[in-house]
Amino acid sequence: MKHHPFYATLAGLSLIAIGLCLCRYAYTPLIPSMINAHWVDKAGAGYLSGFNCLGYLLGCFAALFLPGSVGVRRLLRISLLLAVLGQTMTAWNLGFIWLAIARGITGFGGASLVIHTPAVVLPHVTENWKKIALGIVFTGAGTAIVLVCLVLPFFLSISVTAGWLFEAGLTFLCAAIAWPLTASAPTATAQRQAGPIAPLEKSVKRTLVLVGTAYFLASIGITPHMLFLTDYLHRHFGTSVAESSQLFALVGVGSLVGALTSGVTARLFGTPLALAANYLLGTVAVLMVLLTTSVTVITVSAFMMGFFLLGCVALSSIRTGEISGVARHPHDWGILTLGFGLGLAIGSYGLSGLLSLGASYYMLFVIAQGILAMALLLSIWVFLRRPQTPGG
């Protein structure tokens, strides 16, 4: 079943909006209100993110190992339903365990969308536009973050429940837009008929391991910005809940620009160089938080981190396709996504544990700085190696 490239790209954008934003980072602007309403404390907010990451990890395993038995088509549809269900459940504070289960369900629903969306969208796009289209698809996360951060304060002025219901409604809308595209995803029979995936050469595999390791480190390094920045601004700089939420919208704007330009930069300068430059930007974004007490500078840092995050996701996906080839891309990109989810879980649980032991938000940014510096070095190594791969 072929879809028009415009619709396929829009549907992919909607799937990524759910998988990367609504199932994950749209939680961050809600944290100050949840703490103020005594739904959770600071550490508890981090632990809820950890349960979300745990669900995401389980979803990654499902996305990797279930297509042969249930098919990508059914897996995507189940994931969309779970995403809407989890978001709706979180709208009622029935205790920490209830919220943890809801966040876990939401995380599970988002994983398959992130892993399988590129492979489902690209068959509907011409060869010359594949990198550009993939970059546009990943702008879904940034677009959703901006929309959530700008509109959410109105609903939070009513209640935390209203804020969650707004996000649940937005998740349902994106799911409705993307649902027809899932009909073009492979069934279980088609997956089995595709046969085994050819192994990679050792040199190519080493490059993929380096890309994946840097991607794993990035997922830990972004945690302070993506999980604690709004509450950091609220508690330490005196910004209101509404202001801190709207300032976080700059993360969304950065994400949108980063994803949108990733395909262009990969095409113009080569993906390895674009990735290395992107990691440099993320490292500088954390350094800016450590060196200033200016809210303005920190909000610029938020924009840069958003740019880095979605640029990193889109460019890593593009690079995986270049290294692995079209046939292996869903499998190898799934492995990288699993590693990213593991890093998010380590970052959420580990940094929340440090908070509960008395660490400051500032200390978390110091840790993130060191981790992203290591990721930057790996990305430079990947650029310098540049072995011949299926994608060139």
Image (cartoon, grey):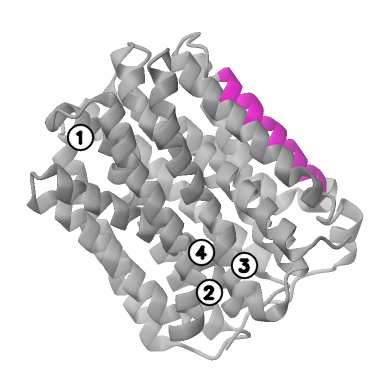
Q: Position of residue 343 (x, y in %)?
A: 41, 49
Q: Which residue is mark 4?
A: 314
Which badge, 3 or 2, is on the more N-terminal residue?
3
* Kind of residue at badge 4: Ala
Mark 1: few, some, or many residues within 10 Å (few <14, many ≥20)? many
Of mark 1 and mark 4, the one earlier in the sequence is 1
Element type at marker 2?
helix
Would you say residue 85 sits in the magenta stretch? yes
Q: Residue at x 46, y 48 (%)?
A: 342
Label whose residue precedes the other's in the sequence (4 or 3): 3
Inspect the image, locate mark 1, and give the three-letter code of the amino acid beneath it: Leu
Numbered badge on residue 233: 1
Q: Earlier in the sequence, mark 1 or mark 3?
A: 3
Whether 254 is drawn above or below 323: the answer is above
Q: Amino acid at mark 2?
A: Arg
Residue of label 2: 319
How far separated are the C-alphas under marks 1 and 3?
35 Å
Which residue is located at x 35 percent, y 75 percent? 276
- Relative placement, left or right, of 314 versus 225 is right
Question: Circles 1 and 3: CB distance less than 8 Å?
Answer: no
